[in-house]
Image (cartoon, rainbow, N blue to C red):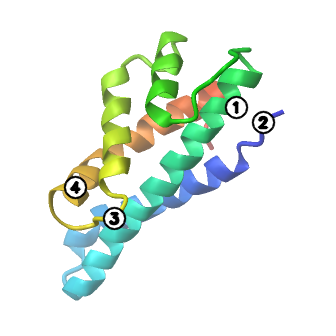
């Protein structure tokens, strides 16, 4: 049996910090360094959640769907998941993979901005995938 607790926790933390990030405009008194810290935290939580998700996806594909000989990297696993109809579009998941790779050592500039733009859609897609894999609603 696959334990989805770590994914649920990392996704919950991402959701909470993303809400914090999206409410920054309403908080005029924050210093720029604090705003940057919140944005960096969203990126870090995205990374943790994404990494947890693709590793659990590998277990799900092997243990629940019985697929043998799975690759040990995200993009090929995402393609296999798409082929098995775990999500409707591969393109968006490949964007998430690229965002994760792009922010590995750089939280500034375009890469960080792209990841912050993708965080909201990623949350929705990760919840949908969680519900499929775990077989339970998101609460």
Q: Is residue 133 above or below residue 121?
A: above
The residue pinned by badge 2 equals: 2
**Residue 111: mark in rendering:** 4
What percent of the width, then of the height, locates residue 52?
59, 47
Question: Which of label 3 and label 4 is nearer to you?
Answer: 3
Mark 3: give few (<14), some (14-19) or many (20+) Cα within 10 Å.
few
> Label 3's element?
loop
Q: Is residue 126 above or below residue 102?
A: above
Residue at image location 30% in from the left, 24% down from the top: 91
Question: Which of label 4 and label 2 is nearer to you?
Answer: 4
**Residue 18: mark in rendering:** none
Which of marks 2 and 4 precedes in the sequence? 2
Residue at image location 39% in from the left, 41% down from the top: 122
> Label 4's element?
helix
Question: Which of label 2 and label 1 is nearer to you?
Answer: 1
> Label 2's element?
loop
Name the quadrant containing residue 135. top right
Q: Is residue 137 visible in this depiction of the protein?
A: no
Q: Is residue 19 above or below residue 79?
A: below
Q: CA distance from mark 2 to mark 3?
A: 31 Å
Contact check, label 2 and label 1, Cβ < 8 Å? yes
Name the quadrant containing residue 1. top right
Q: Nearer the viewer, residue 19 or 14?
A: 14
Residue at image location 37% in from the left, 59% down from the top: 104
The residue pinned by badge 3 equals: 105
Q: Is residue 64 left or right of residue 90?
A: right
What percent of the width, then of the height, locates residue 111?
22, 55
Q: CA distance from mark 4 to mark 2?
A: 33 Å
Q: Nearer the viewer, residue 70 or 17?
A: 70
Q: CA distance from mark 3 to mark 4?
A: 10 Å
Q: CA distance from mark 2 to mark 1?
A: 7 Å
Q: Is residue 40 left or right of residue 59?
A: left
């Amino acid at each position: 049996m696959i334990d989805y607790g770590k994914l649920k926790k990392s996704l919950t933390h991402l959701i909470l910090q993303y809400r914090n990030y999206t409410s920054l405009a309403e908080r005029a008194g924050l210093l720029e360094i604090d705003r940057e810290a919140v944005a960096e935290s969203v990126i870090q939580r995205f990374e943790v959640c994404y990494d947890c998700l693709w590793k659990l996806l590998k277990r799900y594909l092997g243990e629940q769907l019985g697929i043998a000989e799975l690759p040990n990297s995200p993009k090929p696993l995402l393609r296999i998941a798409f082929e098995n109809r775990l999500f409707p579009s591969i393109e968006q998941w490949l964007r998430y993979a690229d965002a994760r790779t792009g922010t590995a050592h750089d939280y500034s500039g375009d890469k960080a901005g792209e990841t912050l733009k993708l965080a909201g859609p990623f949350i929705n897609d990760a919840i949908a995938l969680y519900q499929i894999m775990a077989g339970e609603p998101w609460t």
